[in-house]
Image (cartoon, rainbow, N blue to C red):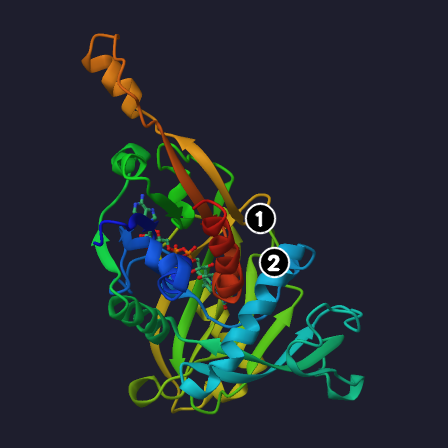
Amino acid sequence: MSTTQRPLIVLGAGVIGLTTAYRVSTDPVLSSLFKITVVARDLPEDMDSQAWSSPWAGANWSPMPMGGEDERIKRWETTTFNKFWDMIPSGLVKELPSRKYGYHATDYSNVWWKDLVRNFRIMEPSEIPEGYKSGLSFSTISVSPVFYLPWLTANLVNHGVNFVRKTVRSLDELSYLAKENGILVNATALGSRSILGIEDTALYPIRGQTILVRCPSLQEFLALEGDEYSDEGGEATYIIPRPGAGDAEGTALIGGTFQVRNWDTSLNMDTARSIFMRCASLAPCLLDKGTEVLKHNVGLRPAREGGPRVEVGRVKLPLGDGLRKRAESGGNAQTEAKDELVVVHAYGFGAAGYQSSWGAVEDVVSLLKGNI
Ligand code: FAD
């Protein structure tokens, strides 16, 4: 580390932590100022761990009702859509023709993202299958966590970013940052519920059960609006084809569930059958003999009452340096104590961490620049 560089710890190696580290390490001002280390319990090689959300995502760009009225989320999702769209030629991002059907007649003529996605069109009643009352067609994108997270990681390694596996239980464990004039970016998602010094009880999980299939005829994002994103029904029916060649060719994630405050990471076979049949009614090719079931999944979306938290603050260390020094000196310490840590929070992205990522991280970068 150059003697002039300050430490920047990005706590969390999910899509938000990795995108933050990527953005900071490629920013001319911030990269010269900070030595970046990503510290996390789950690292990008842990693609089977259910303790984090990022491996289990679709992961496509498709705005949802719960983010619809939040101007910050619209801004983040706009930036992210444009960034991902520009990445299509890399092969890492797939252009995805899409259709969404609804059980209710809904006026989609003013949805905020209609001029952002490509080829947005409200379907004619004659095009809408029986049983549904509305239909939308547009082009969006998907990425595959299996390729995308390692791609971000490889870029970070090339930029000299270090990775450390560590579970942080209290901000006290990072007190050296305060002494070295460092900054913490907290991208720990649901982990922020239980880290001492953060303890954000507004966080809650939304359980998502899905199935990874190989069915090369699936070339469109298909989804039902109406049964999804509800606290009660807990069902979200969608098919998200993934980019990828070789073994990943022709794969799609089909889902799913949207079970609010459900922490259960075990598989439910009745749910799996229901997912398969719901998706097959949207895309009958799933019933073809050649369809392979590759993997059953359960992941937890890291949601937060009040929406995602992207803000900076000075956080008191729970058993701060001052407290320790006073204890060590029998209560008479005169030495200057460094009791506070500058923390930029970036967590609680719920069902939309990928589609918010690049935009939200722009806010993180602005907060960092405002605190140097
Ligand atoms: P995470 O991926 O959970 O990462 C958190 C990181 O913090 C991990 O590295 C973890 O180990 C670390 N950590 C936590 N606590 C500690 C601690 N105490 N000490 C050290 N490290 C810690 N999003 C979309 O945009 N589009 C989709 O189509 C989509 N589909 C989804 C489908 C399903 C079934 C699921 C489950 C999610 C889906 N999501 C989707 C949501 C998306 O996956 C999340 O919003 C996103 O992954 C959150 O990223 P994150 O980096 O905030 O958190």
Q: Name the spot of residue 362 as percent of width and height, x first.
A: 51, 60
Specify the quadrant of the image occupied by residue 100: bottom right
Q: Amino acid at mark 2?
A: Ile
Label 2 packing within 10 angstroms: few (<14), some (14-19), many (20+): many
Judge whether residue 43 can be spotted in this image.
yes
Quadrant of image for the N terminus: bottom left
Q: Tag 1's secondary structure?
A: loop
Q: Earlier in the sequence, mark 1 or mark 2?
A: 2
Mark 2 secondary-structure assignment: helix
- Give the percent coordinates (x, y) of residue 302: 46, 52
Q: Is residue 332 left or right of residue 61?
A: left
Q: Quadrant of ligand 1?
A: bottom left
The amino acid marked with disc number 1 is Gly
Question: Disc 2 marks which residue?
Answer: 73
Instruction: Tell me the residue at 41%/86% (across/down).
Output: 91
| Pick the front one: 187 or 57 | 187
- Image point 56% across, 62% down: which residue? 235
Name the residue: 57% across, 43% down.
Answer: 305
Position of residue 115 measured from the top left corner of the image (x, y, whole percent):
71, 77
Residue 354 in the image, given as x and y percentages of width and height: 47, 65
Q: How many numbered markers are drawn?
A: 2
Rendered view: 353 above or below 178: below
**Label 2 near label 1: C-beta < 8 Å?**
yes
Which label lies toward us, 1 or 2?
A: 2
Say whether residue 206 is visible: no
Residue placed most toward the observer, 217 or 199:
199
Residue at left offset 41%, top offset 47% = 190
- Name the residue beneath numbered marker 1: 307
